[in-house]
Amino acid sequence: MTSIAILGSGRVGRVLATGLAAAGHTVTIGTLDPTREAAAWADTSVAVATHAEATEAAEVIVNALPGDVSVDVLRGLTTYLEKKVLIDVANATERGPDGMPGTLCYPDGSLAEELQHALPTTHVVKTLNTMVYSVMAAPATLTTPGTVFLSGDDPTAKSTTTALLTDLGWHPDRIIDLGDITTARAPEAFALLIGPLFRALNARAFALGIDHSA
Amino acid sequence: MTSIAILGSGRVGRVLATGLAAAGHTVTIGTLDPTREAAAWADTSVAVATHAEATEAAEVIVNALPGDVSVDVLRGLTTYLEKKVLIDVANATERGPDGMPGTLCYPDGSLAEELQHALPTTHVVKTLNTMVYSVMAAPATLTTPGTVFLSGDDPTAKSTTTALLTDLGWHPDRIIDLGDITTARAPEAFALLIGPLFRALNARAFALGIDHSA
């Protein structure tokens, strides 16, 4: 059982909080307005607190904040993040005119690298950002399984993350460790596919996958 | 039967020339040194010519040149490319120290957009660049099928490309039209995954796929 803070109470944060709590973990959602958010979790095991309170109390922190503000918000939590695992699931894009992700905030790099640079003693792992949010905690909803990628510099942090992904229903065969934190660049570019895929596919749930020979 | 020029005699060009010739098309490889290349195709239906000769004679041109020189080479063929379909399968990256694709040449855009801008009367379609070259003409080698994406501004050019993809063995269900030429940005970022995937996977053949709900 791990003590987990989910920062962000949007759709991504709610799906992950529900999934990780169902797996038996101690989950606290960190949000700007805990009073308002608390009602949604009244009959559950999920606690609600401020970003700082949730981060301070947790062993593992999940960044489910909007990607374009993540660096600023998390830098303000530096003290509480020291030597902890930060699982970054956000996509850093400017919002397009149609409400879909537009251009990348860090086209020459990635949000994950920016976070690791801003928080040098924190172990950042990028994962889960290559799929529609509903799939993150329910991979079996797809006709064929997608792939979940890991990027990060710390092997122990990636092991911790892998265990949590397994709890969310991801089969180990579908988890690919891409390497260090710089490998987050390609998965982060998936954000540019979200709008075109919603327009092209007759499906509301999809994920990137790597299909390979036996 | 379509008259097709394949520009580039590397591994990608050779796989596509073989596959398209096997499907009954008239294929000419355009290369810098036709005399040297001709020996490899002596007993086949594939012809070999200069870039200019091959392009002038073809209805459809495939760009299988290195991505970092494609704009310069193709701009020199402008006259022969007018009003024709240009299928761009290249990835534009600087070569990394390990020989794998390194950083993107056009991180704020894409090679496909650069080509369309340089050749305004040519109908550029981006496709096939999200897989190892061997898969392009043999998708059935994968345990589960990958996805092939299309990006381009001209619907007729995309229909022509779709027909050729079908000839190469791609099932229509696995072809996704992402939209206009700007949608090539996300598939082009796949190039950054190639090195990490070769290191991570115990497989020499792989492709990007979109897995979705029924």
Image (spheres, coloured by chain):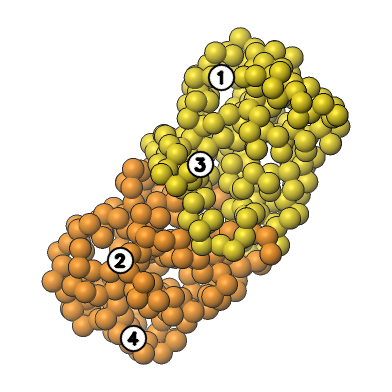
Chain colours: A yellow, B orange
Tag 3: amino acid:
Glu
Task: Kindly identify the residue that appears in the image at 16 percent across and 67 percent down.
Answer: B78
- Tell me whether the residue at label 2 lies in contact with that at label 4, contact meaning CB atoms closer than 8 angstroms: no
Task: Kindly identify the residue that appears in the image at 59 percent across and 41 percent down.
Answer: A129
- Choose mark 3 or mark 1, whichever is in front: 1
Residue A19 figure quarter? top right
How busy is the neighbourhood of tag 4: few (under 14 within 10 Å), some, or many (20 plus)? some
How busy is the neighbourhood of tag 2: few (under 14 within 10 Å), some, or many (20 plus)? many
Q: Which mark identifies residue A74?
A: 1
- Residue at mark 2 shares a chain with residue at mark 3: no
Residue B63 figure quarter? bottom left
Q: Which mark identifies residue A188?
A: 3
The Cα–Cα distance between marks 4 and 3, rounded to whole angstroms, is: 38 Å
The residue where tag 4 is placed is B2
Q: Nearer the viewer, residue B44 or A161?
A: A161
Residue B72 figure quarter? bottom left
Task: Kindly identify the residue that appears in the image at 33 percent across and 86 percent down.
Answer: B2
Tag 2: amino acid:
Val
The residue where tag 2 is placed is B124
The Cα–Cα distance between marks 1 and 2, rounded to whole angstroms, is: 42 Å
- Choose mark 1 or mark 4, whichever is in front: 1
The Cα–Cα distance between marks 3 and 1, rounded to whole angstroms, is: 18 Å
